[in-house]
Amino acid sequence: MRDSRRARLILGILLTAALVILTVDHRTGQDSPLRPLRAAGSWVFGTAEQAGAAVIRPVTGFVDAVASAPGAQRDIARLRAENARLRSDLAASKVDAKRSAELKRMLGLASLGGYKVVPANVVARRGQPGFEEVVEVDAGTDDGVRAEMTVLNGDGLVGRVVHAGPRTSTVLLLSDPGSAAGARMEEGREIGVVHGVGEHGRLLRFQLLDASVPVTRGTRLVSFGSRNGAPYVPGVPIGIVEQVEPASGDLTRTAYARPFADLTALDVVGVVVRPPARDPRNAVLPRREGTR
């Protein structure tokens, strides 16, 4: 009981002293003799507050991160899916633009030569018994395609149809060793035969029927044409001579030509379903560099 009375007395004295100090400090303002003590107290309590915040901040950050982790993961997954879709759309638009350009070039070549064509896409490249260089296209008898029809693209001769199904057809490429097509030199009437030599379509072998006719590097070749335009129509660009073998006294002269059409990277092609009314001769050949 005595201790309690003494404690209350001490507490009252301390409160009275605190009130007196606050009153003096307030009335004296900036000239207060307690200013240094107030500054020291502010520094002590401010430092303690900063230290406490530094300790608590990582904990609260961790708690917030844990609380928001599922939502963040969902956002990341959504953004990744969106980026993948955008990349896919961009790639598709580039492919569509490339095919559109190839189709336009192929139709331009067909129009220039007077060929009626059925556009098709190369859907597979596979070997067939007896053949090495063969592709499958997505056009068939339902589209008017038949066997022994010429196949070309925007650059030149590709090959011929060897089998036609209702919706797809098999095309033997000009580069196949079993392929042969009549060819004519751009300048003059000299003719020969172009054979595939494999090597992934890099070169074609041109055998000129008259060994006395000179052949030079840079000579361009076009298809000579077959009877009734089957399997080859006339005037389609074939290639340009890059190598000429020395004359050896044989009955024929041999040269090697680089095909105008890239036979290793075919996409859009055209099957000639009706030959031209007349031989276009050299009209379909690309312009030489430096000419208008």
Image: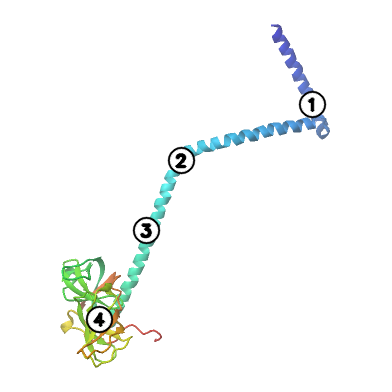
Q: Which residue carries the number 3 mark?
A: 88
Q: Residue type at mark 3: give it.
A: Ser
Q: Which mark is residue 149?
A: none
Q: Which tag, 2 or 3, sits closer to the chain's start?
A: 2
Which residue is more in the foreground, 174 or 70? 174
Q: Which residue carries the number 1 mark?
A: 23
Left or right, 243 with respect to 21, comes to: left
Residue 226 in sight in this render: yes
User: Residue sitting at 75 percent across and 19 percent down?
Assistant: 14
CA gap between label 4 and label 3 equals 42 Å
Which residue is more in the foreground, 214 or 120? 214
Q: Residue type at mark 2: give it.
A: Ala
Residue located farthest toward the top when viewing the structure as drawn = 1
Q: Which residue carries the number 2 mark?
A: 69
Q: Which residue carries the number 4 mark?
A: 205
Question: Mark 4 touching mark 2, by CB under 8 A?
Answer: no
From this view, report whether residue 124 is shown above or below residue 73.
Answer: below
